[in-house]
Amino acid sequence: EVRLEECISQWHKTRDSSTVRNRKVFPSPAQTHQSPITPESKIKRDDTPCSNGSSGDFSARASVDSPNQLLLIVVTGLSFATRLYKITEPPHVCWDETHFGKMGSYYINRTFFFDVHPPLGKMLIALAGYMTGYDGSFPFVKPGDKYEHHNYWGMRGFCAMLGSFLPIFAYLIVQELSRSHTAALITAALLIFDTGCITISQYILLDPILMFFIMAAVLSMVKFNQQSSRPFTAPWWLWLVLCGAALAGALGVKFVGLFVIFLVGLNTAGDLWRILGDLSLSLVDVAKHFLARVVGLILLPLFLYVLVFAVHFALLNKSGPGDGFFSSTFQSRLIGNNLNNVSMPEYLAYGSTISVKNLRIAGGYLHSHWHLYPEGVGAKQQQVTAYLHKDYNNMWLVHKPDNDKTPDLVRHGDIIRLEHKETTRNLHSHLHQAPLTKKHFQVTGYGINGTGDANDLWQVEVCGGRRGDLVKVLRSKVRFLHKATGCVLYSSGKTLPKWGWEQVEVTCSPYLKETPSSQWNIEDHINPRLPNISLSLLKPNFLEILLESHIVMIRGNSGLKPKDNEMNSKPWHWPINYQGLRFSGVNETEYRVYLLGNPVVWWINLASLGLYLIMVAVSSIAIQRGISLQQKRLGKFQHSDILTGGGGLLLLGWLLHYAPFYVMGRVLYYHHYFPAMLFSSMLTGVTLDTLLRNADLLLCQPYSDWLQRGGQMVLLFTVLYSFYLFHPLSYGMTGPLAHEPESAMAGLKWMDSWEF
Amino acid sequence: MLQLPLVVTARLDLVLVLVTLLSLWTRLSGLGYPGAVVFDEVYYGQFLSLYMKRTFFIDDSGPPLGHALLALGAYLGGFDGNFVWNRIGAAYPCSLSVWSLRLLPALGGALCVPLGYLLILELRCSHLSALGAALLLLLENSLIVQSRFMLLESLLIFFVLLAFFSYLRFHNAPGRCWSRYGWLLLSGVSCAAAVGVKYTGLFSYLLLLGVASLHSWKLIGDQAQSHMSVCVQCGWKVLCLLVVPVLLYVFWFYVHLSILQRSGPHDQLMSSAFQASLQGGLSRVTRGQPLQVAFGSQVTLRSSAPRPVPCWLHSHKANYPIRYENGRGSSHQQQVTCYAFKDVNNWWIIKDPARQELVVDSPPRLVRHGDIIQLVHGMTSRLLNSHDVAAPMSPHAQEVSGYIDFNVSMATQNLWRLEIYNREAESEEWKTIVSEVRLVHVNTSAVLKLSGLLLPDWGFRQMEVVAEKLLKAHSGSLGWTVEEHRYGTSQEQKEREAELHSPTHIDIDRKISFWSKFTELQWKMLTVKQEESEHKYSSAPLEWIAMETNIAYWLHPSSNAQIHLIGNPVSWGVANLSLLAYQLLAALYLLRRRRGFRDLPDGAWQRFASVGLLCGGGWAVNFLPFLLMERTLFLYHYLPALCYLYLLSPALLEHIHTHLLSSRTSRHMLAVCTAAVLLSIFLSYWTFCPLTYGNPELTANQLQALKWRDSWDILYRRR
């Protein structure tokens, strides 16, 4: 039995690398293997030890190692060459470099900012910039700004380096999954010569960093799966830990990293399920396996992820543009913020000018401005909103209802009137539906110069306080109860439409439950008649900051809604390469770069997806039906295994990185498809390779080999030629646009929707 | 042969008959009360009226079968469509038979109960379990409320249950019996009906397809059967469960479109060709127009952009202001806008740049794809012009104007190239209504386009038209269609104005095929987005599980009598509990089986799994997708999912009884507990009856006592 396996694996390995002459030594498999192969399902099941454990396999592997290394070197060389070529062109800010370059500068200057993505990617960009001598002084105002003497090549080069690893990782993953150099080579060729992958790797963007971590995680996962027969050995642990670290990296760059976490999670669940069903293992062993994965794939990534944030908060200690998104206590730790070492009157008093901040996480300041609610939205009175930035319109005056000017402190249970300082309107509510939260009442600004009506009166209530308690500035949680209707001032967290300047809705809620949404905090407090006292605020603990920044990020992400009248990219556009993104340049005279996948590569990918599904359907129905495949080649089961096992994993990866975009409400861009595209290209490698290897289903022996070789050659040359045609997309086009005959890209505008 | 006496043996399941009667009684008694519009009846009612008047409408909330069924009830009741559905609570006129409007949904809702009973039997559970499921469905207040009014959920649930029941009948029937394919066909038909009533029926349909493919997969693996027989059986399944439902779904639209033939309020959303196929409306205007546009034709050009509103290319005697509010300058030439109403200023004349005449020659010289044309505004005789001046609202685009020569060395740039982008041949003629054209400015190769922004007061709040250079291909805002069209005959401006004011007329009918109408309507239904805003009674899916929300359906105009959509809290709790218990139990069994412990005999395990797949899966597919939806959602969206849980509970109880409890005493305990729960279900049903039937009226204190949850909105009339 063992000898037979060795023989099979030998035969299998040599097939790839040996010459035709070598193979002819073997008699036609149809004849030799017909009789001994009856227990083929057994071989199929035993194939893991066959390819890993036995010494015969090692010798076979040693013999193929050198071409493997040679190929790997070629792939590496080409990959780096294509990505690093013309890396400094164009010498101006391209597309989203304006954001991520700017954020890199923020790190170098240690200024606090807010972004919807987690910080790791930008920190790495900043590190690369710092190491290569960029001083953080370039403002990155808008795309097209010239870099001049600033050192930008380091940041671009770093991203391109990480981007260059993608084809290499893909090569290794596919080789591990399919045990075929050809499949790996096809994949690597598709990725190396894809103009889209090149372009997206060449600029200061998060995507190359994200994809680097995604591919690293998948590679370590696959390698880890390979080690499953030798659990708890050093390489086993190594790949497990690497996988965990890469997952943390992916999530630390963008939340899209969650998808690869799902992929690894599903794979691990399947793996554990297999281990659980292995009755030769005791429950203790199963528990050990389980715990090892919990440590390696949950606790370690979590720790690293939190560590990234800890570094982020430690680095950024100066006040900057992101302050207003965070709570008062958070702001107090930023140097230069007005709440840092603050000094103001300690207790809220009548006649004071105050700003009021909502206590829900990332709640805004109570705000009003010279604009009315539009027709049809409640009463046509002045808007009252919550606003996340510090602004003069956030200031309110505290008055007694009867305009009594005697100085006095405000106490729990007092009735007050809040007058908007800029517009002199009173904070007002009445029995009209709120604009978005229809169950609540509308809050408006009403009256003039402070004279209004009975609906302007609010009762102050300190949470947890008793009648007569004083209201502490910054430290008391305060609620404002509307006197006439009994509702409570509330921030719903919903973004108002355009007429409300996309600020946050403020309502008066009839449901009196104490929630942070209905609790407020007095932040600024100016009263010349009272002495200023230095207030030391409780420093927030790290976990609170972490939670707060996540909620702010998630809200920021869901706030990126597509605008009307704008051409939006739809997920179905992406696999067909419908429309790219303009990275640089619009006019004929400019240096233009257009992010668009190599259409030949992308359409091959698309076709292979369909092909893959057909092949899997045919082979699994045949197996389920019990149609005997004995007289066909022995490797058939291997092939169907590769298709359903390795291919299935890649298909799952593609689905996980693509399907969720269909249900996302946020604005989508073409470059969101790139992680999915990597999986799709790997699947193409596996599919086409398996297809070509089964050429002997059509033709008899020597011709089928020719067909296989010929197919591989045609595929490679097609990809190369298409790259030759489309390379100006990445490396810059000048001169007339493609629809004019004298352009360099003339005749290549195959779809009307491409804009080059 | 006729020795035997002729015998008819009838077997009657008396329990089934009893629950059916009870169900009919709870759903149908006093159906005419209240004689006023209740909640969403106000929404469906307007379509009912349009149906009665055979007027075309488009409703994005669901496919037409649901509306058609409601309309059928109204039609049988002799409703003439003359009722203004404007507010909830408006009293129906005496002439209207309220009873007939509500009959079909109520019948559907009533039949859900016996269907639940039969479905449990098909899942191979005992009659006692079946009775339990029937009682849960019977005593569920929210199902009763939803059934008793002119709403669609009860019909949806009925068709879904019918589909599953008939599929299981098919599956459980012995293999050689041919009549079982009748059940399969019935299943396919009910699937089509469920999807036809509401799109949410799709979830259950997909689940049924999943179950069917799982069974087929087992069939394929059954090597005792010949290839032929496997193929035939799979073929039947594909035919009955895929082909038939799709065909029927299209058929619902066929019925819909053949009933609704008159033009109506939603015409504007459809393409010109569609509108022209309806009686009245555009077809009256365009009837008999010449088809091909020629040089000298007088036309109105409608933008194909669906948003913000349909409009026509327009110009009027007013110029762009010399300076805009933000200080930018303009050309101060005549405004060109897009106007959402029919107007004489929408007329333009197609002119050959080489000639001066504005009349059509005989024979007419037709305009073709690629021709260079000028457009003359009919009333002011200005030529449509564009130039390198920033447009008023979208400064990145070029301004479009009616050219006025101010002697400021601003040359005329008034040549436009015609591109017909739905052409079938090069050099195709420009056709009225059919052709979608783009007008490309010859000097700058910018394209005439609706920007979608409104001009301020100086532009009379009409829509801005610009010419933009970088064309985003196939964007709808670039296309224009000729709608009204006539061959110009008058050379003099005065005569021409008179001609423009006169209506176009001549007579031919233009038809488009059913398929193109169907695809257009379906596409519009899926893409038309109405402004979704929160409703006072809308709720989030997570609030449904614990029923933290309710909906007030109706309040008596003078007293405290009211109807609410509130479920039976006890049954609701039982349902949630059983779902949780099932999940825990299933997880436990799976883990133990994986470790080699076979707790259940194979048959029992199969049954347990299939109950979970159908009922648990049914709950999941009918609930989880709502978590991802960004629509206004209501408690009644949860009712289909809830029904699945009511089927799950008794089946799970039976499983526990037979397989987990071994001792006599514990079985007795279980029986007693079940009886107690059933009793409390009945009591809570009884307690909430006044809010379910709106009768009798309760005092404020009694209402207060019924407010079991703080988050429920129960209305009190202040006295």
Image: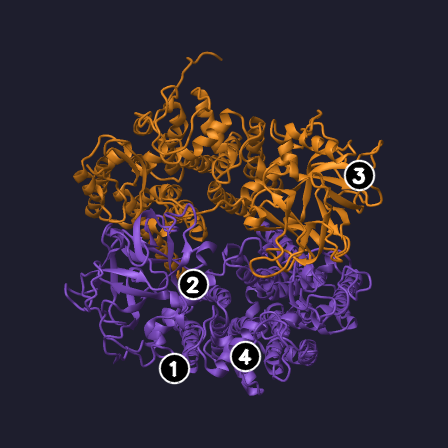
Chain colours: A purple, B orange
- Residue A266 location, x and y as percent? 48, 63
CA–CA distance between discs 3 and 4?
62 Å
Q: Which chain is disc 3 placed on?
A: B
Q: Are marks 4 and 1 in contact (CB under 8 Å)?
A: no
CA–CA distance between discs 1 and 2?
26 Å
Look at discs 1 and 3 and give the one toward the viewer. 3
Asked if badges 1 and 3 are on one and the same chain, I answer no
Q: Which amino acid, mark 3? A: Phe
Look at discs 2 and 3 and give the one toward the viewer. 3
- Residue A389 location, x and y as percent? 41, 68
Q: Which chain is disc 1 placed on?
A: A
The quadrant holding residue A215 is bottom right
Q: Is residue A124 visible?
A: no
Q: Nearer the viewer, residue B664 or B494?
A: B494
CA–CA distance between discs 4 and 1?
24 Å
- Residue A738 location, x and y as percent? 76, 62
Look at discs 4 and 1 and give the one toward the viewer. 1
Residue position marked by numbered label 2 in the rendering? A555
Q: Is residue A160 visible?
A: yes
N-terminal-most mark, 1 or 2: 1
CA–CA distance between discs 2 and 3?
57 Å
Q: Which amino acid, mark 2? A: Arg
Whether residue A534 sits left or right of residue B257 in the image: it is left
Image mark for residue A125? 4
